[in-house]
Image: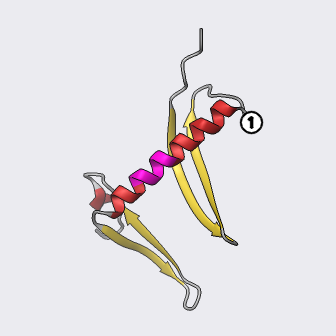
Amino acid sequence: MKAPLAQAQLQRLVIDYRSGELVLRCLYKTDNGPNPGTVRRRREVEDLAREGLRQALDALEGDVTMAGTSGFTTREDVLLATTSPDADKLVKGA
């Protein structure tokens, strides 16, 4: 009998483009999940990343707020897109 799958909760998904590569960093919490390096753990993280990307794309279809900017010729802007009913509480000054 297989052990039940641990419930994993996505905490943060960071997307970087580096030299033509797409690098996803996935931070999540889980209770007694699969050991590092196992196929099951890789699949669990892949599923979390896919769902996180789907949620991000859905959120970008709605109201998006510019939450921070920096730089002049090299720019880094931070967008805040949320589907939360309490979205106004997440943005300083809102």
Instruction: Please state the extent of the stretch shown in magenta in the rendering.
Output: 50-55
3 or 71, which is in the foreground? 3
34 or 19, which is in the foreground? 19
Q: Residue furthest left?
A: 85
Residue 86 appearing in the image: yes
- The dominant secondary structure in magenta is helix
For the point 71% across and 29% down, the residue is 35
Q: Which amino acid type corresponds to the residue marked 1 in the rendered image?
A: Gly
Q: In the image, is 79 to the left or to the right of 71?
A: left
Q: In the image, is 11 to the left or to the right of 60?
A: right
89 or 58, which is in the foreground? 58
Q: Quadrant of the C terminus?
A: bottom left
Please tell me whether mark 1 sits on a helix, a strand or a loop: loop
**Which corner quadrant of the image does residue 62 belong to?**
bottom left
Q: Quadrant of the N terminus?
A: top right
Q: Which residue is the site of mark 1? A: 37
For the point 41% across and 57% down, the residue is 56
